[in-house]
Image (cartoon, rainbow, N blue to C red):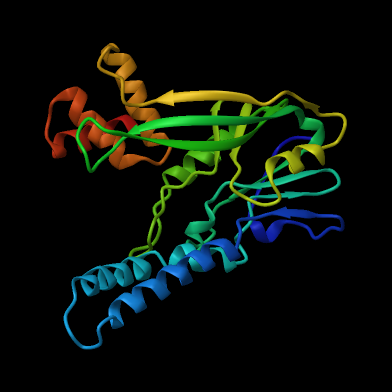
Amino acid sequence: MAITLMKPDDIRQAANVTTYAHSKITPLLIWLACLCVAIVMLVHNGPHFHPLKIFAVVGLLFLFLFKRFIIAPFQSSNWLVRTAEDGLYVQFRSYLNYRWPVLTPTVAFIPYCDIRSARLVRETVTVPRLDRQNASSTEFHRYVELELISSTESLSAALQEERNHSPPDNTATYRDYPVTLKVPPFLRIEWNVRPNARTFLKRLPASISIHDPVKLREDFTNVHGLDAKQQEQRIRELDRRGRRLEAIYLAQRVRCCGLTEATHYVDQLEK
């Protein structure tokens, strides 16, 4: 058997299927709590002006703009992995882009016999901050990494096509790529879903070797000591992770250029 690409509607219904999806309750509760705080601030001191009311209005606008993070988990497209008896389905389109029409395959079926090993990868990533010069922020990511046996050319092409996908006009785009194939044959799935990654690994067949977890560190801030080729690779990798604004900001720093030139430079790297 080999990796098969398909659309979500082509997935056959089967028994004993476990779905790994993003939480619905947690983001909803956070959104509702912030909404309640904003309303309380808005009605504070009745009709009289108060500085808190300015923050309340800004908060309500923020909640409105990010309502998609609350709506997306309740869509049928909110799933990342589905395990069946003979393999697993991996959806590489972000659940946040649920409004995109499904015109091309966005799901890969990977038979268990095509998976040699799996492991948990914890990664610490340091990226430049956009709101403060020479400052950085630290992020923590968790992946399930699968070592594949069969050819990954078709899957790699599908992942690249998804990255280059142009949605219809007026359709919001989230540069969120939960599945990557940076170094074939290792497929990485960013695990922000439930059940957790350890549970998923325990449920894999015994034929798949489960390696010990590893910890990695990526730093996208200390690039001035690198040569031009290495700096280019760091900027491209930052953009590949969906951090386009940070990639443009980093290009401005290392090339000492303006915003327009840095944006054009990152565009050329992507092509």
Asked whether residue 184 appears in the rendered view, the answer is: no
In the image, taking residue 260 as reference, residue 72 lies left or right, namely: right
**Residue 234 in the image, given as x and y percentages of width and height:** 35, 24
Single out the residue that lies furthest toward the bottom.
47
How far across and down, in percent of the image, does residue 11 sit?
73, 56
Point 73% across, 55% down: residue: 19
Q: How many marks?
A: 0
Say which residue appears at 78% left-offset and 53% top-offset.
18
- Asked whether 152 or 19 is in front, the reply is 19
Relative image position of residue 163 (x, y in whole percent): 44, 43
Q: Which quadrant holds residue 147?
A: top right
203 sits left or right of 6 in the view: right
Quadrant of the drawing holding the C terminus: top left
Q: Is residue 259 visible?
A: yes
In percent of the image, x 14 and y 39: which residue is there?
260
Q: Quadrant of residue 201?
A: top right
Q: Residue at x 58, y 24 (%)?
A: 215
- Residue 171: x, y in percent? 38, 63
Nearest the camera: 263 or 271?
Answer: 263
- The quarter in which the N terminus is drawn is top right
Observer-nearest of 129 and 56: 56
